[in-house]
Image: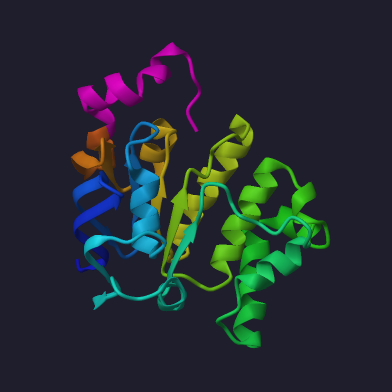
Amino acid sequence: MSALLSVTDAHVAYGKVEAVRAVNLEVRDNEIVTIIGANGAGKTTLLNAVMGILPLKGGVSFQGADVSRQDIEDRVAAGLCLVPEHRELFGTMNVEDNLQLGAFRIDKATASRSFERVYTLFPRLKERRKQLAGTLSGGEQQMLAMGRALMGAPKLLMLDEPSLGLAPIIVADIFRIVADLKAAGVSVLLVEQNAQAALKIADRAYVMELGEFILDGDARDIASNQRVVASYLGFQHEGASAV
């Protein structure tokens, strides 16, 4: 199966400090891929570089085309979209207006269908469509950030720490929705510190340490790897509930 997204020999630096080194990554059609690792491992840096927010030395191809020199808007138009860790919503605008911003590249008929799709995935957003984004709960804001990204009908959605700061019951909802996206034909690249939840829904996984991938493979194999269990999944043996 050909790769939807292919990153080859990626290097990303902040000045003289190399945050990502020699990373190779693939995401295929109709697949959830997760990158797990400790805070500061380079996960967010990698996503930002793939999106074009940070300069990347190496190759980035999407749907078989080289996008490494494209600007962010062109990558979005091609079907690549990032939901950032801090959501970056417009708090003084209502839910519907925030969603509308995600449809800036599509026609009105397609935007109308996108609204229907987003409100089906996130019925709570439909209930609060006239509410200011800044007054939503953390979970609702995450849903809105994901919904805004989906308005442009992306082929690949990159999610940066979608469970961060959310209550366990909301985390379960978010991860169920991520799984639903795959069923709806949207591939997902998921960066997540909640390794247990991420590996449960992912098809494949990469483990990142100090800017490098140290392990990759089938998510179930990664979840049973003793090094991963010791470093990232140890909490599951202390009674923590799984998503």
Estimate the x, y position of residue 68 in percent, counting from the top left: 28, 70
Q: Please tell me which residue lies in front, 86 or 102.
A: 86
Q: Please tell me which residue lies in front, 33 or 104.
A: 104
Colouring: rainbow
Residue lying farthest to the front in this orientation: 16
Estimate the x, y position of residue 129 in percent, counting from the top left: 78, 62
Q: Quadrant of residue 168?
A: top right
Q: Quadrant of residue 95?
A: bottom right
Estimate the x, y position of residue 111 in percent, counting from the top left: 63, 79
Against 165, residue 99 (above or below) is below
Residue name at image x 37 percent, y 35 percent: 40
- Using residue 87 as the reference point, say whether residue 232 is left or right of it: left
The kind of secondary structure the magenta stretch mainly shows is helix
Against 8, residue 175 (above or below) is above
Q: Is residue 232 magenta?
A: yes
Residue lying farthest to the right in this orientation: 130
Estimate the x, y position of residue 22 in percent, counting from the top left: 16, 50
Residue name at image x 67 percent, y 49 percent: 141
- Using residue 120 as the reference point, say whether residue 182 is left or right of it: left
Q: How many marks?
A: 0
Residue lying farthest to the top in this orientation: 238
Q: Please tell me which residue lies in front, 167 or 17.
A: 17
Question: Which quarter of the rendering shows the N terminus?
Answer: bottom left
Residue name at image x 79 percent, y 48 percent: 135
* Residues rendered magenta in the picture: 223-243
Q: Quadrant of residue 66?
A: bottom left
- Using residue 238 as the reference point, say whether residue 59 is left or right of it: left
Q: Is residue 89 magenta?
A: no
Residue name at image x 49 percent, y 19 percent: 240
